[in-house]
Amino acid sequence: MVTAMAPEISFLIPAYNAQDTLAEALASLQRQTKANWQAVVVDDGSSDRTWELVEALAAADSRIVAARQANKGAAAARNHAARLAAAPLLCMLDADDWLDPAFIETMLPMAADGSPPAIAYCSYRRVAPDGRPMPVEEAPLLAGDAAKREFSSFCALAIHTVVFPKSLFERVDGMDEDLQTCEEWDLWLRMAFAGAEFRRVDACLAFYRMKPGSLSGDPTKLVRDAISVTTKAEALRRQHGLPAEGPETGWITPAVSRLRMLVWVVAAKHDPTLDIAALAALLPDMPDVAGYESFFAGVILHGLQTGLLPDRADDLVDAPEQWWPTFSRLVRLIQRHSLPGTGRKILEAAAWQLSAGNLRRSFTLGTVQVESVTLGALSRIARAEQADTLIMHGFSGDAHIGTFVGPLWGDLSIRAQIRLILQEMQAGDHLEQQPTLAYAAAWAREALRGYRSYGGLILRGGRRRARLEKLLVRTGRNAVLAQAPGDRQDNDARLSDILRDLERGLPPVRHAAAAAPRKEKPAPQAQSAEDYWEQIFERPDPWNYLSVYEQVKYAQTMSLIPQGTETALELACAEGIFTEKLAREVGRVTATDISQRAIDRAAKRCRDLSNVELRVLDFARQQLPPDQDLILCSEVLYYMKDEEMLADVCRKMAAALKPGGCLITAHAHLRCDEPGRTGFDWGHPFGVETIRRALAEQAGLALEETIDTALYAIHRFRKATVADPVLRVETHGTPLDVDVAKHIISGPAGVAREAAWATEVTTSVPILMYHRIAEDGPAALRRFRTPPDVFRKQMQFLRRHGYYAVTAPTLANLLRSGKPIQGRPVMLTFDDAYLDFRTNAFPILAENDFSADVFVVTDKVGGRSDWDCAYGEPAALMAWPDMQELQQKGISFGSHLASHTPASAMESDALLAEALRSRHALESRLGSPVVSIALPYGATDFRAPGILSLAGYTIGFTTRAATAAFSDNVFGLPRLEVRGDRPLEAFPALMGLPGAFIG
């Protein structure tokens, strides 16, 4: 009899009618490289010779403990075994599975009964009934919250791959005996939320026996138990305050998790008689799985592999009759409850995953035709009857030289294949150019067509050799294409016919002639300060001194003028707007300015005021009139070239005052001067704080009173001793002119645009996706609606952190260049062209100096968003005049298709026609080329980029959540959705600046 010292690990083994496999399972323990284990075998009411076998094995090996119970199920048997276990660590081994001899030696060092408790887990592989090992099932990484997230959705670990502390098992109350299936999933879930640390062992140490009929378990029980576990998971997630479910957080909703189990079970059974509708009726709700298409394709294929046991995943294509009925039934079930076109995308994803297993395989899966072609042996390929999507892998010998994915219109003649190889795969170097007469003739024809290019190279100097080589290569490739056989039924010919017919149906677009910019003479370089200011005053009232903002500032300044002031000197009086007000409050005014133009206009304005004297004066260089009771000098001292010049001017002003006289000055807060507060980003060297300090340093001059606002401060200094200065905090005038507002940076210190432009480069661009900017609307559409006050704070945040906006045409050019982009670019996009973009969004964009792109549903312009009518009252959309006006103000417009139909739900011809029609409508109405498109719902598919390119677009946007990078497909650029149902504090994190101040 074998005996052992105190065990380090106990194996919990339920055995029900296991006489054929139990001995082998226990033998795998007896072969372990470490012998200090215990196996507690619980006979769960077997009706065969299991108990006799257990007794005999236990009699021969004291490490095996035999126990017996009436049939209560596997969970109860494991709980029974755990109570008898003597070791601090446990592992659950089924009676028909086995372990690698190194299992205990490898796993024990990774598991620990500590704080937090550590759980070790490894990979495993299934073994077919005929003994064939299936591919290894790799264990996922479950660090941190990943364990909670994964187990909230599915059972990420096989039962016998996990070693865990007995104390933890007891703390979570063992296995749930009410569950007939999924009991280990439920246990791992509770352990994860109990704070256990999951440690992966990168080895395959466990084996799962696939027996005939091993998947004959009741699908109804599996689905019902999955509902129970996911319901518990949702309660735990809420209890622990973890993120809400959704693709952007990585947490899968309970509804998707339950459907996942249903789909996997049906695929694994691949039984055409299985009542899928009855199983679906068990689910509390059927989810829309748009966005999860690749995920569900993988689930279905994994289920099929588990049930059919092919050696490789791609071997499924050899026997589609065994699984296609099940696959198509599942896709139809999912499609009935999802965004139109979801089924197509699942099909595409499945075809891609099967093809990825072996690029040499050619097959057709529904509408997707996969072809592998060898460049040295091209032959005509007929289009499969239902196929409208092509995946073509090109090989040169054994080397894979490229893949084309896109729409399929007709047969693939040799010419059509060569065009794809040349133009789409960019693999022309691998094509052999046969030295035949036909090729020579074709080469000559192509050379003649390009005679002007050749002639230009001969006439022009410079680096002609490189250009000549490129031209020769292009000529050669065109010759290869020209001599290749094609026909009127091939892909290219059919596409040409389709495009010709569609374009005939569209009237010609007459782009508004871009008003040729008048070639005005550039202003001569100013040779002096006088010249500079004369140029400024070429346009009357260059700073809009009649605005509410300026008039409020004037009134506040007037309130600081002492009663009974006799003489006043106004420096930089500009056109006399303030002079006119000042003259009514003092005895005599001497108003001066460096610009003769300004003085002339001021004289005209003040011609009826006898107490006003106007003169040209450069106060920075000339002496000031002395003996003044009051000097006013506002909004000009930042133009001093440096602080030394500022100090000199301040001394002059102080000297020109009588004893007891006052100096009043108003200047703005500038970010360069006060980076921690709201201020302007003008390029002056300093602002009001430095000016105040320079004046306060003048002997005999003391600060007497200050009016401070968010944007500027007005100071009154007195040439006398002052007790305590008075501070009045007041508001500034609103509304602000756009030209003023766009220079304001709100909040604490950030990054200036100019600084970011000078010091930073990037190869990625955050593209933000908005819909409505509005307060009110249907509750169900809350995520698509950002309140204006929140939007304003978001735009202020971007402005504060140095972002500048790029529009789609600019972004397309930047991506094509492939060069790093300077500064901090951001793209702001708005889907659907709601009317509240004009009324609410645009003013906020303008005041923060941002442009934007709006994607228009062209058939609905001027109407309402009827695609939202299921959720409440549809919102109004902009009309063409609205867009025409906004375009003149720098807003860019692109297509959102014509009907707001998901592109993946449309036939290829219909999608091409609608994309063309939408672009045509935009160009006709707006009078300029349109290059961008964002497909409704982000519903792109394998065909869409190629079709959109054919329709004349050059850049396209999706709803995939990521920052756009140079490596992205130019028609599949991702966007970051700005959700209206998220707190304001989520926005900095979205921009990669978590915790930064906003609000």
Image: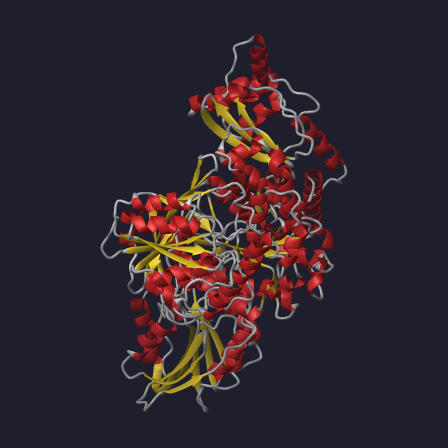
User: Which residue is situated farthest in the top direction here?
Assistant: 437
- Residue 379, position in %: x, y? 59, 19
Residue at 56% across, 60% down:
227
Side of 163 where 708 appears, left or right: right
Residue at 54% across, 59% down:
225
Side of 823 where 900 appears, left or right: right
Look at the picture and state if 643 lies above or below 452: below
- Camera-side residue of 838 and 527: 838
Quarter residue 718 falls in? bottom left
Side of 617 where 105 appears, left or right: left
Count of numbered badges drawn on the protein:
0
Q: Is residue 503 something one can see in this rendering?
A: yes
Quarter residue 438 falls in? top right
Look at the picture and state if 28 lies above or below 244: above
- Camera-side residue of 992 and 552: 992
- Residue 827, position in %: x, y? 52, 54
- Camera-side residue of 186 and 515: 186
> By what rule are the colours in the image chosen?
secondary structure
Residue at 47% across, 58% down:
183
- Residue 64, position in %: x, y? 32, 52
- Camera-side residue of 442 and 331: 331
- Residue 710, position in %: x, y? 45, 76
Q: Is residue 102 something one can see in this rendering?
A: no
